[in-house]
Image (tube, rainbow, N blue to C red):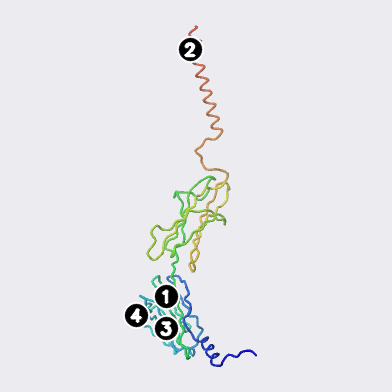
Amino acid sequence: MKPRIPTATAFLLFTLLLIPGTKQQSEVAFLSGQQNTISCGHPLTSGDFSRVIWSKAVGGNYATILEYNADGSTVEPPTSPLVGRARAVGNVNLQVDNMVVGDEGEYECHVRFNNPFGDERVTYNVVVRVQPSDPVITATPSDTPVTDVPAGTNFTLTCTSTGGRPPVSHTWTLDGTEIPANTSLSPTPNTDGSGDTVSTVDVVIPDRKGQTLAYKCEAAGLSPIVTMAATQTIKTQKGTTAPSNTLSAGAIAGIVIAVLVLVTIIVGLSVYFLVIKPKH
């Protein structure tokens, strides 16, 4: 015969399973300058709860952002850290307008249920990231041509992204194939964790006559930063190579022949004036 669980014990276990509590803190990331929504994670109707309180940790304590009541009314205290920029959506979710880096921190959603089992609290670590400027590619020297470029021409391409939080990473490709690059972050990052990214590639135009080469710099960051890219196209020259400081084989042969002829003339004149002429 199987042992039976006492009725009182079974009721206590069932009750403990239903008692709301504090859920594990999770991290959510948003982009600055946008309207973002922090979800409380409760698909509640007005009959399930009496009040929802959203707060933000400030100076070691929670400061109330707003209170949303089951009758649909909202109370926003004048001391709210998001005064004028927060509202309740979907009963229990918090919508923040024009989110800024200063809004980063710990948030709490406190739901008061219409039952005898208490309340439930959900905390979030909100991270605010900043979309950097679109990447820009420049060439050094600045007068580097981009059309009819002879094979063997060499120069440097520089890609710059400014203001990313955190700074983004760069990936360079040539016609879709990744190529090595030198990447550095801004030497003095801002105190809020944002910064610039600069990368360079040394280019030597290959012997691909009359073709268009696509050098692409892709700037990617942590979600929800949007990946952006810039492309510099180079059109190679048809049938010629870059000017060279070295002499061709034909030029060298011509110089050798001229020197030999000159030496022969000098030797002939020397023999004539020093040996043959004195005898006459």
Q: The residue under label 4 is which amino acid type?
A: Thr
Question: Gap between marks 1 and 2, in whole Å?
Answer: 105 Å
Q: Secondary structure at mark 2?
A: helix
Image height of 211 relative to 6, above or below: above
At 51% from the left edge and 18% from the top edge, which residue is drawn? 267
> Are the residues tagged 1 and 3 within 8 Å (C-beta)?
no
In the picture as drawn, the residue positioned furthest to the left comes out as 78
Question: Gap between marks 3 and 2, in whole Å?
Answer: 117 Å
How many numbered marks appear?
Answer: 4
Q: The residue under label 3 is which amino acid type?
A: Ile
Q: The residue under label 1 is which amino acid type?
A: Glu
Question: Gap between marks 4 and 3, in whole Å?
Answer: 14 Å
Q: Which residue is mark 3?
A: 53
Whichever of labels 4 and 2 marks the residue nearer the N terminus, that label is 4
Q: Secondary structure at mark 4?
A: loop
Image height of 199 relative to 254, above or below: below
Give the percent coordinates (x, y) of residue 138. 46, 54
Comparing labels 1 and 2, the label whose residue is closer to the camera: 1
| Front-lying residue, 140 or 180 | 180
Q: Which residue is mark 1?
A: 106
Give the percent coordinates (x, y) of residue 109. 44, 81
